[in-house]
């Protein structure tokens, strides 16, 4: 504990010293996003932990991009939460405590939707240099900020104009998911023709249900498209009699501030790799991004050739490249007659603290304090195959009280498998789902021709693992 306290004091001192350089920072002229995977620590009632230091660093990055300690004026938006009042008050106090010049709650929520056209709130928005969207349910942001024809409300138009003028956009959990949408940043070839497609927004479902068995009479139930008017109608997307929760999504997307691919959150902790890959495949999208908990994907110079993605936080950002994915490669070759969904050859990259990524060229830059694991692996063989590859919510610490909020028995399982594989001399491994009707399998393969490489580094007494271009195959064996 003594060492931990010393580490915290040193880290906080470094954060404070860094902050002095931000005192007179003007609002950024280029567009910036900070997209957090959820799970931020409580900064108003802090507990000694390395996780808290990372949360504070994420707040500091948001304040920096919004204009620095003397210039940052943060608009707090918590319409995604059932407890929007308490959440709004919390984030307002958090931003002020950590140095924002000002923070104000934007009073739009599920009980006050009409405020989205209030001229006084439009004026309030126009004075802000950054906007923070809290967690909850991203569908509530659709119903509170968008009109039924999917056009912007007056307040959202004002936020969008402020963003174009240099204000930054921040989100956590549902507040991250809602930023996806708009037109995909590149044209996609569909059936031999270049097509411009929209980026949808994930609204629910698990990785297992994204790949579960389909029969001939049920082919349309594997994915559920939702409209504005039925975002809360669970009957359209679930069958309570068999606990069927298909992958659901809003095809028109969210607010469209991020158009480089699909977005998700809480990814490794909740085993969401399968659901984001399945939706990307279904919608002809090559790129998908998702930060883990207490971790931020920071995007600067958005919508320019100089765009850059970086990582701030405790864990990492998951990036999936489906540009070479097929149904007849890798493990999928053995499934030629299968009735199940299968996607193979997905490139999986995982970036941690100080790593960078260019979404236009798919170039990965690993922090210079991390070294390749190739040739210095600690294990001859990878661990035995996992039996809970998607960190099932049905496999929880207290089996008599499982729910979506219960602690999972094996959080971050697929990611832990990947890191273990790179730290071994094994060329591949696989995992199976906890659910067994059917069993979905995921094969992980280090492929030299694809540039599969793992990295390790230590910073402030913490271990960080990164990797790039690990091949993933998703399939079911009968």
Image (spheres, helix red, strand yellow):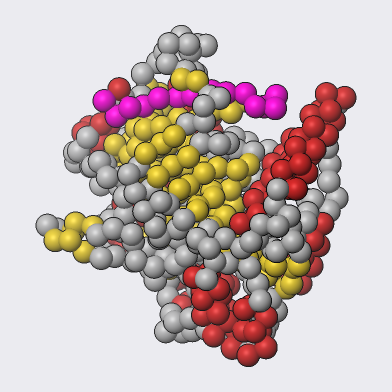
Residue 225 is drawn in which quadrant? bottom left
Question: At x 50% / y 61%, what residue is drawn?
Answer: 31
- Furthest residue toward front: 24
**Which residue appears at 73% of the width and 55% of the height?**
23
Q: Is residue 157 above or below residue 380?
A: below
Tell me what residue is drawn at x 76 percent, y 41 percent: 17
Percent x, y of residue 258:
45, 60
Give the answer, above or below, for where 398 lies relative to 93. above
- Where residue 216 appears, as percent x and y from the top left, is 25, 57
At horizontal 22% and vertical 35% (from top left) the residue drawn is 329
Specify the segment rendered in magenta: 449-462
Q: Nearer the viewer, residue 13 or 265?
A: 13
Q: Nearer the viewer, residue 24 or 289?
A: 24
40 lies left or right of 455: right
Image quarter where the N terminus lies is top right
Q: Residue furthest right?
A: 2
Evaluate whether residue 445 shows in this view: no
Residue closer to the observer: 393 or 67: 67
Residue 325 visible to the viewer: yes
- Does residue 150 belong to the magenta stretch? no
Which quadrant holds the C terminus? Answer: top left
* Residue 83 rendering spot, x and y as whole percentages: 73, 68
**In the displayed structure image, the side of residue 275 where residue 388 appears, left or right:** right
User: In this figure, what is the number of numbered marks?
Assistant: 0
Using the image, determine if residue 447 lies above or below residue 269: above
Residue 425 or residue 102, whichever sits in front: 102
Residue located farthest toward the left when viewing the structure as drawn: 192
């Amino acid at each position: 504990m003594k060492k931990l306290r010393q580490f915290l004091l040193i880290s906080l001192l470094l954060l404070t010293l860094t902050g002095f350089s931000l005192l007179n920072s003007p609002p950024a002229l280029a567009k910036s996003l900070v997209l957090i995977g959820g799970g931020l620590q409580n900064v108003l009632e802090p507990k000694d932990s390395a996780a808290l230091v990372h949360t504070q660093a994420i707040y500091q990055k948001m304040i920096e991009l919004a204009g620095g300690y003397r210039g940052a004026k943060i608009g707090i938006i918590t319409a995604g939460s059932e407890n929007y009042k308490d959440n709004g008050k919390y984030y307002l106090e958090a931003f002020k405590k950590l140095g924002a010049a000002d923070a104000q709650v934007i009073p739009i929520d599920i009980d006050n939707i009409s405020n989205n056209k209030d001229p006084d709130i439009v004026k309030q928005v126009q004075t802000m240099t950054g906007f923070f969207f809290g967690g909850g349910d991203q569908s509530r942001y659709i119903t509170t900020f968008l009109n039924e024809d999917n056009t912007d409300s007056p307040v959202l138009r004002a936020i969008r104009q402020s963003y174009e003028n240099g204000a930054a956009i921040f989100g956590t959990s549902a507040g991250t998911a809602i930023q996806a949408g708009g037109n995909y940043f590149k044209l996609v070839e569909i059936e031999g023709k270049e097509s411009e497609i929209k980026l949808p927004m994930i609204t629910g479902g698990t990785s297992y249900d994204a790949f579960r068995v389909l029969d001939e009479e049920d082919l349309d139930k594997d994915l559920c498209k939702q409209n504005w008017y039925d975002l809360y109608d669970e009957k359209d997307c679930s069958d309570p009699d068999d606990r069927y929760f298909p992958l659901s999504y809003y095809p028109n997307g969210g607010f469209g501030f991020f158009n480089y691919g699909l977005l998700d959150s809480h990814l490794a902790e909740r085993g969401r790799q399968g659901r984001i890959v399945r939706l990307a495949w279904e919608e002809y999208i090559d790129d998908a991004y998702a930060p883990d908990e207490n971790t931020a994907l920071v995007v600067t110079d958005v919508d320019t050739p100089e765009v850059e993605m970086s990582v701030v936080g405790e864990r990492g950002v998951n990036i999936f490249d489906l540009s070479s994915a097929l149904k007849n490669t890798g493990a999928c070759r053995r499934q030629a007659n299968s009735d199940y969904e299968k996607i193979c050859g997905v490139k999986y990259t995982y970036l941690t603290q100080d790593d960078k990524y260019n979404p236009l060229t798919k170039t990965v830059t690993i922090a210079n304090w991390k070294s390749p694991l190739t040739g210095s692996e600690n294990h001859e063989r990878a661990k035995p195959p996992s039996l809970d590859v998607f960190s099932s919510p049905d496999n929880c610490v207290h089996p008599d009280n499982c729910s979506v909020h219960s602690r999972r028995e094996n959080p971050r399982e697929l990611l832990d498998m990947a890191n273990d594989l790179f730290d071994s001399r094994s060329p591949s491994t696989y995992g199976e789902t906890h659910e067994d009707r059917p069993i979905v399998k995921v094969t992980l393969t280090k492929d030299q021709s694809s540039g599969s490489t793992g990295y390790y580094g230590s910073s402030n007494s913490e271990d960080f693992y990164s990797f790039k271009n690990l091949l993933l195959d998703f399939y079911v064996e009968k």
